[in-house]
Amino acid sequence: RRPKKRTKIIEMMDELQKENVYIKDKERVEKLLCQLIQDGKSKLQIITDFDMTLSRFSINGKRCATCHNVLEDSTLVPESKKQILDELRDTYYPIEINAKMTIEEKIPFMMEWYTKGTGVLVECGLKQSDLSLAVKESNAQLREGCDWQFHALHEHSVPMLIFSAGIGDILEEIIKQHSQMYANMRVVSNYMDFNHDGMLVGFKGDLVHTYNKNEGALRNSDYFTTLKERRNIILMGDSMGDLRMADGVPNMQQILKIGFLNDNIEERLEKYKEAYDIVLVSDSTMDVPNAILKKIL
Ligand code: U5P
């Protein structure tokens, strides 16, 4: 008799056999998949990052816009301010993706970046009514397969938390223009504060940056408490900070972490393989998460 295959589900899924898919601990992932499938959709919730996770990193070799970039690249921001924002990005983005620094070391720099950046945006006199056009004119796009995924999760009443250090208003507009905002989606992000004339005057609530999502998760404990029967989580992210998005989820039983590694790949691959159950390198699609969802829903 042949020994029973211990990674049967993984081997059955073509999407997981591709060269850009890395699974360090196949037995763990096999067990997770088996449990998620067995428990089914009523026990499932999704927690996901937005920029470069739901949205695409690049198209034909050209970087796609993040929520912030949508504004920075638009005609709404005067050249002089663009220059300041570019300089900020050139200073702080390398820190965001630096493989040698710890999260704790990065946090003060992220605070600085976001505080300065949002300050500059407020000085631009942005109007709420201009946002839609800025998104239309940008190359911000969703990954292939997001539309199917959003629709399917809604159809099967699986809640999706989108947890983003981007800009909530822009993120929603990107989703609306390229797919649809559904009732099962909840967004935690930086939302713009407009005055009665529709002019941007600041940002609401506590700042979310790439590496303080754990605090944001704890602030949203009410949301997680209402979903406490949904003890299985699929988490999707593109940064080490995203791994903390599920901190504060009570009663969590299983968490399958899917990481998109888009940039600085060689330096970060080992760390990502340690931290994420499944790592997708330079993948512009949702094929893998969707294949898994198809088995569960
Ligand atoms: N970001 C910008 N400009 C900023 C601040 C942040 O492009 O002024 C980008 C970061 O590089 C990061 C994303 O990729 O926004 C934040 O979203 P998240 O993926 O960490 O949620």
Image: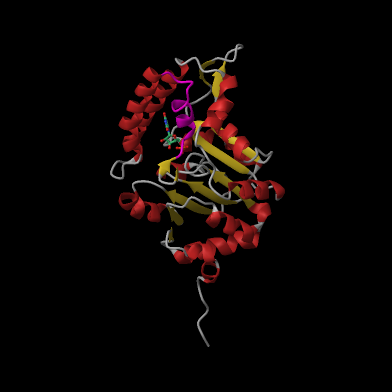
Residue at 39%, 20% (x, y): give it.
79
- Going by the picture, which residue comes out furthest to the bottom? 1
Instruction: Give the quarter of the image for residue 97.
Output: top left
Task: Return the residue nearer the eye: 79 or 197.
Answer: 79
Task: Return the residue nearer the eye: 26 or 92.
Answer: 92
Q: Position of residue 121 (x, y in %)?
A: 45, 20
Report the quarter where the C terminus lies: bottom right
Left/right placement of residue 39 relative to residue 96 reads: right
Image quadrant, ligand 1: top left
Q: Position of residue 72 (x, y in %)?
A: 44, 26
- Magenta stretch contains residue 68: yes
Q: Is residue 292 above or below residue 95?
A: below
Q: Is residue 183 above or below residue 38?
A: above
Residue 190 visible in the snapshot: no
Instruction: Give the quarter of the image for residue 249.
Output: top right
- Going by the picture, which residue comes out furthest to the left? 100
Residue at 29%, 41% (x, y): give it.
101
Left/right placement of residue 267 relative to residue 291 reads: left
Q: Is residue 110 above or below residue 269?
A: above
Residue at 47%, 22% (x, y): give it.
75
Q: Position of residue 232 (x, y in %)?
A: 59, 53
Left/right placement of residue 184 relative to residue 287 reads: right
Q: Position of residue 102 (x, y in %)?
A: 32, 41
Residue at 48%, 50% (x, y): give it.
284
- Magenta stretch contains residue 90: no
Which stretch appears magenta?
A: 64-78
Identify the coloring.
secondary structure
Chief secondary structure of the magenta span?
loop
